Image: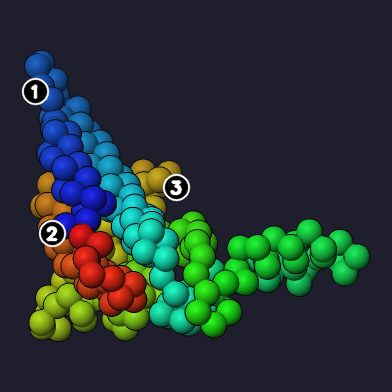
């Protein structure tokens, strides 16, 4: 089975190929090349957007499952608990002593259960990805490690060659997207580039989806898997 996030991602992928260069009627070679270039840039940004949305939706789906199953705090990885409590603790620490009461009450209300033996509560999915500015490979390794998957790229591949292919495909897509989004007019992607990017993120999402599902299932200790 696949997560709802993966299903949505795969359903959105055909949109990339729908962006095609329109027929040129009476145009010049220069105008044709400009259109090809513009389409490649647009496909890159759109594909990156779909990829990033998958990561955030999968995270939200996983957290919703754990909340529904009322997972005991002791079953959660320590890294998840520490990350979940980081922002409110940092906010409390940066607030003047005489103005800490409200923040302290909020911290106790939202996170006390994480540090009490046998307690259950509700995780806030947004806290687990608030630090991620882009789904670069290093950030993906960091995210999945919170869920006890030490190196997601190694976990979903059998050979170093395949691992490197996925890593480079994801890295190039994100880098290219960032260059385009920040106004670098020289950044472009050919049809071959876009197809390679799409294959990389599709393979990553399909494989990582299974790994995340298994890990969340183990953490929850439930009778039915999340997907």
Return the residue at label 3: 182
Nearer to us of marks 1 and 2 is 2
Q: Is 92 left, or right, of 140 in this rendering?
A: right
Give residue 158's position: percent from left, percent from top.
10, 82
The mark tally for this picture is 3
Which quadrant would the C terminus be assigned to in this image?
Answer: bottom left
Q: What whole-number distance in Å separates the C-alpha atoms at marks 2 and 3? A: 38 Å
Q: Residue at x 49, y 70 (%)?
A: 120
Give residue 167's position: percent from left, percent from top.
24, 71
Q: Which mark is residue 1?
A: 2
Secondary structure under tag 3 reads loop
Q: Is 195 left, or right, of 102 in this rendering?
A: left
Return the residue at label 1: 23
Figure check: 102 above or below 223: above
The residue nearer to you, when weighing 222 against 55, is: 222
Q: Residue at x 32, y 83 (%)?
A: 150
Q: Earlier in the sequence, mark 2 or mark 3?
A: 2
The residue nearer to you, when weighing 214 against 202, is: 214
Q: What whole-number distance in Å separates the C-alpha atoms at marks 1 and 3? A: 29 Å
Give residue 8's position: percent from left, percent from top.
22, 45
Q: Earlier in the sequence, mark 1 or mark 2?
A: 2
**How dense is the environment of label 2, judged by Cα within 10 Å: few (below 14), some, or many (20 and up)?**
few
The residue nearer to you, when weighing 29 against 115, is: 115
Answer whether residue 67 is visible to the viewer in this image: yes
């Amino acid at each position: 089975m696949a997560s709802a996030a993966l299903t949505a991602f795969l359903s959105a992928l055909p949109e990339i190929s729908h962006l095609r260069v329109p027929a040129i009627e009476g145009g010049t070679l220069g105008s044709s090349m400009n259109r090809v270039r513009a389409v490649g840039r647009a496909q890159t940004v759109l594909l990156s957007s779909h990829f990033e949305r998958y990561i955030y939706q999968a995270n939200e789906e996983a957290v919703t499952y754990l909340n529904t199953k009322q997972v005991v705090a002791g079953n959660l990885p320590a890294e998840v608990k520490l990350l979940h409590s980081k922002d409110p603790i940092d906010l409390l620490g940066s607030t003047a002593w005489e103005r800490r009461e409200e923040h302290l009450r909020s911290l106790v209300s939202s996170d006390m259960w994480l540090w009490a033996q046998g307690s259950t509560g509700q995780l806030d999915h947004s806290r687990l990805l608030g630090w991620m500015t882009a789904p670069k490979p290093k950030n993906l390794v960091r995210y999945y490690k919170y869920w006890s998957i030490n190196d997601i790229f190694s976990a979903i591949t059998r050979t170093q060659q395949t691992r490197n292919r996925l890593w480079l495909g994801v890295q190039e897509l994100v880098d290219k997207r960032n260059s385009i989004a920040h106004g670098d007019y020289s950044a472009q992607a050919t049809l071959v580039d876009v197809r390679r990017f799409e294959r990389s993120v599709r393979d990553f999402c399909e494989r990582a989806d299974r790994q995340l599902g298994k890990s969340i299932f183990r953490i929850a200790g439930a009778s039915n898997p999340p997907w």
